[in-house]
Image (spheres, rainbow, N blue to C red):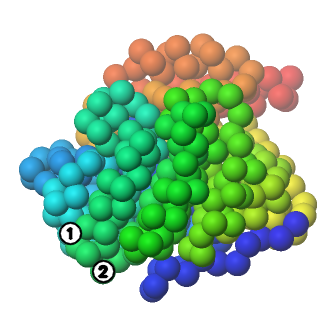
Amino acid sequence: MIMPPAIHLGRVTIDPPLVLAPMSGVTNVPMRLLCKEQGAGLVCNEFISGYGLFYGNAKTQDYLLFDERERPVSSQIFGADPAKLAIAAAQVEAAGSDILDLNLGCSVRKVVKTGAGACLLQTPSAVARIVEALVAAVSIPVTVKIRLGWDQATRNAVEVARLCEAAGAQMVAVHGRTASQAYKGVADWSAIGEVKAAVSVPVLGNGDVRSPEDAAELLRQSGCDGVMIGRATEGNPWIFARTAAYLREGTLPPEPTADERLAMALRHGALMREFKTEDRTACEMRKHVAWYTHGLPGASALRTAVNQAHSWDTMVGLIDEYRQRLAEERSA
């Protein structure tokens, strides 16, 4: 196994080239910190409305907050108006982000109906104008995240990636599905390789990376410069450390134990409480506890109880009780 070399984008170094994908409602500060601690070379925040930044929406601007321990950190914005996005981009840079990323991959209806996200793949010339405006507006690296195309009939990722490079983008991340596929079917890693062969900037491969072995196979099939991991990080920040070890040494570290998973859930909640209110912590940690405990014996009752809890302190008590019960069962 061979770990790809570090990626250098101006003063920004991504080492190892294993990247946390931006995910709405998931990749906030606590999640990013945990993934960074586990060896992610770059973390990305939840994707942000460029229009929200342009109009000064306070909640939107809160998404730009980060912890210095996360660096390097990428902020991803979406929108379709080059002038408004340029102003939003300047705010991203002023907030201290190391990289500005343009979302050209989101296929959620509320995004594409505004002409943004993956919808822009249907008009490559518009993509080029937006990237040019962003590059002119900031001094930090501008990157883009795309899909293979809008649908199977218009798989134009190579064309879009070339236009983005010509407009000044310094890196391209490619999800190996079309927008119409969303997350159905199988990611086409060889198509990511076609993009890699067509441009000179670094290319990250994304889609269906659920394990260290998947990351190695994506690299083998595509020849890309790094791997972006999304949904597989949910309840599993260890995937970065395990993937790095596998790519460097060829040996696969063991999966985290039940105790390690529960301890990480507790740490995740404690971090969340540092950055969120009690109510928001309890609300957001319900899904994270479900992810951390997926597949553990008798955990369905714990998840039911957690979903009914209204404070993080209550959740901590429930997790501790469950952990004690597991310990007693093991020693019986």
* 10 displayed left or right of 78: right
Visible residue check, residue 29: no
Q: Residue furthest left?
A: 55
Crowding at mark 1 (Cα within 10 Å: few <14, some 14-19, many 20+): some
Q: Position of residue 249 (x, y in %)?
A: 87, 69
Is residue 273 placed above or below 203 in the rendered structure?
Answer: above
**Mark 2 to mark 1 CA distance (whole Å):** 9 Å
Quadrant in the picture for the N terminus: bottom right
Name the residue type under label 2: Ser
Residue drawn at (60%, 13%) of the image: 301
SS at circle 1 = helix
Quadrant in the picture for the C terminus: top right
Q: Quadrant of residue 111?
A: top left
Name the residue type under label 1: Ala
* 92 displayed left or right of 231: left
The disc at residue 114 is none
Residue drawn at (67%, 54%) of the image: 192
Q: Position of residue 18 (x, y in %)?
A: 63, 63
Residue drawn at (71%, 34%) of the image: 186
Q: Quadrant of residue 202?
A: bottom right
Q: Which residue is mark 2?
A: 139
Q: Which residue is mark 1?
A: 90
Is residue 328 placed above or below 71 in the rendered structure?
Answer: above
Q: Position of residue 263 (x, y in %)?
A: 61, 44
Q: Quadrant of residue 173?
A: bottom right
Residue 122 versus residue 176: which sits nearer the camera? 122
